[in-house]
Amino acid sequence: MRIRNLFKIATVMLVMAFAMPTYSNAAVITSSVRDSTTDARVLSDIINRVTEIQNMDKTNLSASEKTSLKKELKDMKRKADGLDKRVYLSVGAIIIIILILILILK
């Protein structure tokens, strides 16, 4: 019985620790908020530029031009990855969430 009470107290303390209000720099910076139309426009620009690079004749380019193209493609890939706003949950995370909910609700 004592261990069960300890687990209940520990879960309540964890919930309280995560529920405490905190301040981050993301809340202060409001210029980074984008809408979906801007994201779609940036994504279409990236797709157009990548197709241009794919259709280029790269045999006449020098080594420095090829490396600059590779660097540009890597930068565009980072931008495109930043536009992805999905949240992924693993099976382990879902199981942990369910277990915590069971402990709290019992």
Image (cartoon, rainbow, N blue to C red):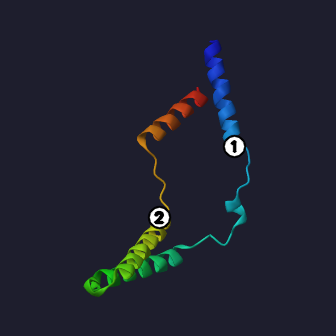
Q: Quarter of the image holding residue 69?
A: bottom left
Instruction: Label 1: state its secondary structure.
Output: helix
* Residue appearing at x 74%, y 48% in the figure: 21
* Residue appearing at x 25%, y 84% in the figure: 59
In front of the other: 82 or 17: 82
Instruction: Label 2: state its secondary structure.
Output: loop
Tell me which amino acid carries mark 2: Asp
The image position of residue 54, as x and y in percent, is 30, 80
In front of the other: 55 or 62: 62
Q: Quarter of the image holding residue 67?
A: bottom left
The image position of residue 41, as x and y in percent, is 48, 80
Residue 30 left/right relative to 65: right
Q: Which mark is residue 73?
A: none
The image position of residue 85, as x and y in percent, is 50, 62
Alpha carbon separation for disc pair 2 and 1: 27 Å
**In which quadrant will I find the N terminus?**
top right
The image position of residue 92, as x and y in percent, is 44, 38
Task: Point out the residue furthest to the top here.
Answer: 1
Q: Nearer the viewer, mark 2 or mark 1?
A: 2
Q: Which residue is mark 2?
A: 84
Tell me which amino acid carries mark 1: Ala
* Neighbour tally class for label 2: few under 14, some 14-19, many 20 plus, Cα within 10 Å: few
Residue 62 left/right relative to 14: left
Task: Point out the residue furthest to the front here.
Answer: 63
Position above or below: 89 against 66? above
* Residue appearing at x 28%, y 87% in the figure: 60
Tag count in the figure? 2
Position above or below: 53 against 13? below
Disc on the earlier residue, 2 or 1:
1
Q: Which residue is mark 1?
A: 19
* Residue appearing at x 39%, y 80% in the figure: 64
